[in-house]
Image (tube, grey):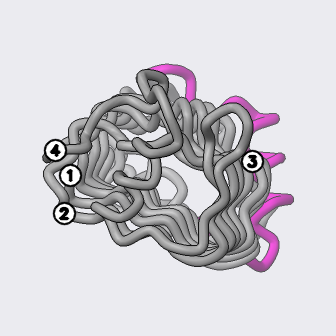
């Protein structure tokens, strides 16, 4: 596309005006450092982008850049009032993602191995399914809505698990075989997570059976299917 070049190469405000016109961005203000604030929404979905065409600062509405070829989020806004969606790109990192998102954050269908760079202030749900996560490092500390990290088939532990107010979905992850009896529903989940972690039930590729049994006895919940667990872990008796 004619105006697709990095923000740092801009030589005048005319470049920024031209790019905003190209992508239908209105109600914007150009800041002294070349970033822009947008009072409203930004739609950059399915534009064939390999990089974001502008450097945004604040966007009061939602920000969509999904279904492109982005490999990074350089230029993404620091604050988004609505939802932020970057799903179906080629992201290997969330570095550059907004610091604060008022609605949902969606990074589904990328190539992320961790959640480093994810917003730590989030008003809605967090979706990171169909990635390559090996840990939840970098996840928000708390999530007001739901948390869906299903279909990350290398996710083997609950380290850095966020405090989730809504439902949690962990289907098709190895760790789900150990925790699926209690992880989904909000009631009592945080206390169970803390006790689960304190017992060090999962140690690398091993599950310590006496500690798992203690956890379920104390919490008065049924034991998980050990045969299912054996597909992913060595059970130490």
Tell me the CA gap for discs 2 and 4.
16 Å
Residue 223, quarter of picture: bottom right
Does the residue at mark 1 contact the one at mark 2 (Cβ under 8 Å)? yes
Would you say 132 lies left or right of 98 here?
A: left
Would you say 142 lies left or right of 205 here?
A: right
Question: Mark 3 against mark 4, which lies toward the viewer?
Answer: 4
Residue hosting label 2: 46
Q: In terms of sequence position, does the residue under pointer 2 or pointer 3 come before the other? A: 2
Read off the magenta span: 182-204
Does the residue at mark 3 contact the one at mark 4 (Cβ under 8 Å)? no
Residue 120: which disc?
Answer: 3
Q: Height in image: 227 above or below 210?
A: below
Q: Residue at x 66, y 59 (%)?
A: 29
Is the residue marked by circle 3 packed among few (<14), some (14-19), or many (20+) residues within 10 Å?
some
Is the residue marked by circle 1 packed among few (<14), some (14-19), or many (20+) residues within 10 Å?
many
Residue hosting label 1: 68
Does the residue at mark 1 contact the one at mark 3 (Cβ under 8 Å)? no
């Amino acid at each position: 596309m004619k105006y697709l070049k990095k923000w740092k190469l801009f030589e005048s405000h005319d470049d920024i005006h031209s790019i905003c016109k190209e992508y239908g961005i209105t109600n914007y203000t150009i800041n002294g450092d070349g970033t822009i604030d947008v009072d409203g929404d930004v739609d950059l979905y399915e534009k064939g982008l390999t990089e974001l065409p502008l450097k945004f600062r604040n966007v009061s509405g939602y920000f969509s850049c999904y279904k492109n070829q982005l490999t990074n989020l350089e230029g993404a806004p620091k604050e988004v009032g609505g939802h932020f969606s970057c799903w179906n790109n080629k992201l290997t990192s969330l570095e550059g993602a907004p610091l604060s998102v008022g609605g949902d954050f969606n990074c589904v269908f990328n190539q992320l191995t961790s959640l480093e760079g994810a917003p730590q202030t989030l008003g809605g749900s967090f979706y990171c399914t169909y990635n390559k996560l090996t840990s939840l490092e970098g996840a928000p500390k708390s999530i007001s809505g739901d948390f869906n990290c299903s279909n990350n088939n290398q996710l083997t532990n609950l380290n850095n698990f966020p405090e989730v107010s809504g439902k949690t979905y962990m289907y098709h992850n190895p760790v789900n075989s150990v925790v699926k009896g209690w992880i989904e529903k909000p009631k009592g989940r945080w206390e169970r997570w803390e006790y689960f972690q304190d017992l060090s039930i999962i140690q690398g590729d091993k599950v310590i059976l006496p500690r798992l049994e203690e956890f379920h006895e104390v919490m008065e919940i049924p034991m998980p299917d050990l045969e299912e667990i054996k597909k992913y872990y060595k059970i130490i008796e």
